[in-house]
């Protein structure tokens, strides 16, 4: 089922993370997981998905019950401070993954993009998935990156703490099912409007790489 997601992102320091985790526990948030993730976001050679504010993502991660792949469609709806997405996702181990996979391929067809092959669902790692996806024509690479993620939740509110490679930084994402709820959460946790980072991780990583390249020249 398609879900609505409203998201705010903030760059943070180690000190702010320590303070935030205490805030979260004290205000009733529970730790959902603490693990490393690898995100792979393909696109067509012409980057048609990005041009249409559309994204598919394969996220590999190691959980207590074993490794898995989370397959996600994100359809961006707003470009203001708050990021508003229609989101559809399932883990490869979930019973509904075939239904989700079929719906994502239908959405790709609406953009004139060939489907992701069903054989992908029989694979277990990104190392296996990436060449199959590329062979199907999705040779554009919007992101392939690792991060360490902690996720806390309270009801339908979600707070994630992401540690990307050292030269890229650390970020907190606030997620809620409505725009009003995500801004209320921002205020509750003491984040300021002027500190909102409207970039997605793909753009954040690209910016850091360009800055690193300019420094090395």
Image (tube, rainbow, N blue to C red):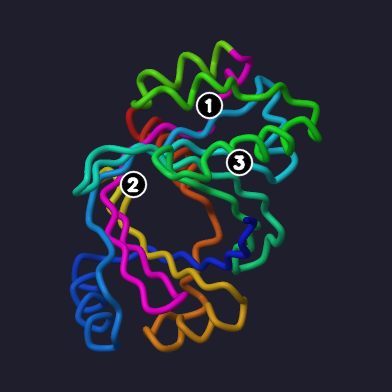
Residue 190 placement: quadrant: bottom left
Q: Is residue 56 left or right of residue 146?
A: right
Marking on residue 167: none
Characterize the magenta stretch by its predominant secondary structure: strand
In screen coordinates, is 137 left or right of 67?
right
| Label whose residue precedes the other's in the sequence (3 or 2) | 3
Residue shown at the point (42%, 65%) measured from the top left = 173
Query: Quick one: 212 or 110, which is closer to the camera?
Result: 110
x, y percentage for residue 5? 58, 64
Residue 141's disc number: 1
Label located before the other in sequence (2 or 1) = 1
Q: What's the CA distance linking mark 2 and mark 1?
A: 19 Å
Give the numbered dot on residue 99.
3
Instruction: Answer whether residue 211 is visible to the viewer in this image.
Output: no
Q: Position of residue 99 (x, y in %)?
A: 61, 41
Left-right relation of 189 to 19: right
Of the 4 image quadrants, the one containing the N terminus is: bottom right
Does label 1 or label 3 sit earlier along the sequence? 3
Q: Which residues are magenta?
A: 136-162
Few, some or many residues within 10 Å of mark 2 (<14, 14–19, 20+): some
Q: Nearer the viewer, residue 52 or 99?
A: 99
How many circles with numbers are drawn on the protein? 3
């Amino acid at each position: 089922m398609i879900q609505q997601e409203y998201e705010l992102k903030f760059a943070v320091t180690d000190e702010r993370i320590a303070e935030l985790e205490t805030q979260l526990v004290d205000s009733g948030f529970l730790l959902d997981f603490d693990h490393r993730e690898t995100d792979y976001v393909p696109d067509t050679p012409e980057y048609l998905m990005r041009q249409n504010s559309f994204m598919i993502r394969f996220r590999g991660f190691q959980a207590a019950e074993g490794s898995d792949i989370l397959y996600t469609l994100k359809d961006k709806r707003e470009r203001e401070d708050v990021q508003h997405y229609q989101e559809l996702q399932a883990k490869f181990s979930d019973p509904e993954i075939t239904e989700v996979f079929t719906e994502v391929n239908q959405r790709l067809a609406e953009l004139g993009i060939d489907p992701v092959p069903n054989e992908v669902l029989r694979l277990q790692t990104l190392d296996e998935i990436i060449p199959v996806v590329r062979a199907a024509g999705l040779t554009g690479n919007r992101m392939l990156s690792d991060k360490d993620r902690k996720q806390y939740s309270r009801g339908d509110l979600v707070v994630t703490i992401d540690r990307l490679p050292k030269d890229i930084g650390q970020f907190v994402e606030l997620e809620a099912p409505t725009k009003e709820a995500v801004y209320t959460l921002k205020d509750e946790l003491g984040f300021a409007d002027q500190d909102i980072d409207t970039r997605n991780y793909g753009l954040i990583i690209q910016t850091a790489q360009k800055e690193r390249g300019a420094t090395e020249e």
